[in-house]
Image: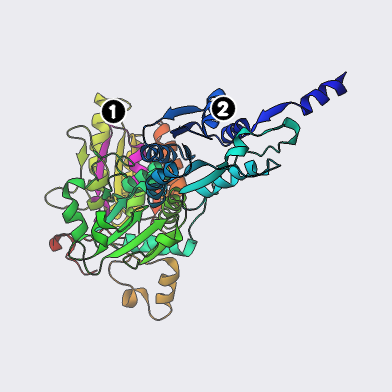
């Protein structure tokens, strides 16, 4: 009996149209647009029977535009179904548009009958889908002879194929990523241009993190809008011309230097502007303007590489304050003193309540930090139990009143001290450089006046008096220690945060803000 059922199954007939529809269904095709006619009508009917939505249009050109937009919106190709001759010719505009926009698209056209004895051609659908979505996405045409559509074959003769896998994620060369990070870090007027390639790559989360973590202004192209919201404070769309004209480093995320961006040429841009181009397509790199750095790869993956590179050791001020800001309680007191530490902290660490920030003030006094923090902690303890005081100190500033840590511990005050340690006043040197200097003469003769002893363990001052001390060198260590300090309401804490000794603030427009030559 089972043998009889198998024989009946093997002799079951199925049309070519149904096999084509099933091949599309296997490739996760959800929508078909087109205008039916001989021989593709049967394909549209079979597709509907399998749950694929068919949208009948009035012109093949519009149908092809719609199908290509599906590819952009979903990442899997939409299908345009046309007849041969004029039908295919009308679809060419949509195919060209899909290719230029890099959107995946399948165009299926019916052609005159040919003598065929097998169904092997239906195995081309996975390859067609692969061609449309791998590398640079675009249009792919599949020609279906009329006799294929109407041919009846045994089900057992059909060779079923699997769904085409999603495109592999490619990453840029590590050396190029590091070079790009260095160029951006040294920029005076950086600008990100976010194109539709970033939208297609679903890079919104990583790009927004890059924008916010490093305070980078951005400009979206028309179809790059929304990757980072238009109402974001770092969007410079309202000052587009000025942003383009004065930027010294521009990062292109899936954007082309075409007519929309004035081809990247003066007078719209600085003659010496440096472009960093991020794109999935090698052929796009260097069009119109030679980039300073090219990053070939998936835009989302490359952006994450860039974030990882900028977060690598040692940290800088902006990395530190980004991670601190993420965890600061909204009602905390923020006390700050130091040179770069206080100046940069003012722009990054946010306050939400009045009279909750204390710093060096009009007189620019160093040494006020711990005294201010103790006062704020006493007020908080009496009026708002549970409220925390975050005291952010440069390593030099901490030295003015560091012994007040004993006072903090004696009264068990709810203070978290953050010492941002760059081994000096403004800038210092690392341990290796320090040792090299001392080989020539004694410290008083060769050590620059702004240098302090490298890698000083200020956290041990806190542990000496019974508080909690942390020595951190990575973003992960900083996040963990701050989380533990905020959770521990029984003891004060000091987090000694090591940063790049030569780290400094971004160059300012007003020279008097950074007048020192050190």
Q: Earlier in the sequence, mark 1 or mark 2?
A: 2
28 in relation to 264, above or below: above
Residue in front for this viewpoint, 217 or 505: 217
Residue stretch in magenta: 322-342
User: Which residue carries the number 1 mark?
Assistant: 381
Q: Give yes or no for residue 340 being in the magenta stretch.
A: yes
Residue sitting at x 24%, y 50%: 342
Between 85 and 262, the one lying in front of the other is 85
Quarter in which the C terminus is drawn: bottom left
Residue 195 seen in the figure: yes
Residue 394: image location, x then y, percent: 30, 53
Quarter that holds the N terminus: top right
Residue 214 percent across, percent down from the top left = 32, 50
Q: Residue at the top extreme?
A: 1
**Mark 2 falls on what kind of element?**
helix
The answer to whether any part of residue 203 appears in the image is no
Q: Residue at x 24, y 43 (%)?
A: 371
- Mark 2 highlights which residue? 46
Mark number for residue 366?
none
Q: Around disc 1, counting alpha carbons within 10 Å, would you say few (fewer than 14), some (14 to 19), or many (20 or more)? A: some
**Picture coordinates of residue 285 (x, y %)?**
40, 62
């Amino acid at each position: 009996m089972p043998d009889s059922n198998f024989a009946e199954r093997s002799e079951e007939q199925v049309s070519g149209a149904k096999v084509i529809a099933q091949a599309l269904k296997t490739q996760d095709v959800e929508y078909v647009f087109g205008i039916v006619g001989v021989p593709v009508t049967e394909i549209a009917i079979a597709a509907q029977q399998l749950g694929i939505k068919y949208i009948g249009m009035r012109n093949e050109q519009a149908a092809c535009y719609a199908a290509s937009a599906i590819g952009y919106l979903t990442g899997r190709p939409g299908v345009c179904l046309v007849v041969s001759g004029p039908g295919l010719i009308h679809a060419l505009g949509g195919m060209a548009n899909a290719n230029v926009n890099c959107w995946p698209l399948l165009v299926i056209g019916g052609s005159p009958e040919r003598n065929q004895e097998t169904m092997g051609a239906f195995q081309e659908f996975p390859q067609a889908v692969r061609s449309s979505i791998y590398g640079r996405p675009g249009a792919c045409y599949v020609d279906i002879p009329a006799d294929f559509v109407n041919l009846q074959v045994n089900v057992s003769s059909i060779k079923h194929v699997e769904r085409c896998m999603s495109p592999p994620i490619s990453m840029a060369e590590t050396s190029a990523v590091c070079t790009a990070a260095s160029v951006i870090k040294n920029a005076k007027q950086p600008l990100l241009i976010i194109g539709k390639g970033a939208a297609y790559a679903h890079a919104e989360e990583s790009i927004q993190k890059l924008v916010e973590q490093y305070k980078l202004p951005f400009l979206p192209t028309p179809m790059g809008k929304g990757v980072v919201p238009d109402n974001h404070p770092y969007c410079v769309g309202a000052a587009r011309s000025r942003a383009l004209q004065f930027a010294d480093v521009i990062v292109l995320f899936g954007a082309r230097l075409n007519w929309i961006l004035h081809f990247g040429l003066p007078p719209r841009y600085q003659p010496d502007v440096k472009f960093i181009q991020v794109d999935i397509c090698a052929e796009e790199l260097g069009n119109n303007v030679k980039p300073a750095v090219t990053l070939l790869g998936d835009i989302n993956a490359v952006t994450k590489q860039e974030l990882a590179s900028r977060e690598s050791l040692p940290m800088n001020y902006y990395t530190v304050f980004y991670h601190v800001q993420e965890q600061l309680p909204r009602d905390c007191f923020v006390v700050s003193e130091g040179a770069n530490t206080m100046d940069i902290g003012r722009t990054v660490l946010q306050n939400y309540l009045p009279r909750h920030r204390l710093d060096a003030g009009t007189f620019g006094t160093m040494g006020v930090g711990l005294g201010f923090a103790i006062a704020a902690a006493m007020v908080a303890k009496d009026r708002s139990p549970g409220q925390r005081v975050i005291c952010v100190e440069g390593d030099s500033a901490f030295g003015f009143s560091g012994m007040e840590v004993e006072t903090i511990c004696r009264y068990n005050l709810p203070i978290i001290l953050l010492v941002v340690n760059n081994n000096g006043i403004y800038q210092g040197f690392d341990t290796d450089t320090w040792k090299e200097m001392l080989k020539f003469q004694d410290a008083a003769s060769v050590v620059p006046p702004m240098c302090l002893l490298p890698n000083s363990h200020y956290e041990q001052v806190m542990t000496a008096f019974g508080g909690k001390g942390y020595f951190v060198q990575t973003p992960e260590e900083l996040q963990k220690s701050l989380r533990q300090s905020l959770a521990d309401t029984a003891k004060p804490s000091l987090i000694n945060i090591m940063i790049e000794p030569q780290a400094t603030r971004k160059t300012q427009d007003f020279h008097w803000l950074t007048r020192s030559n050190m």
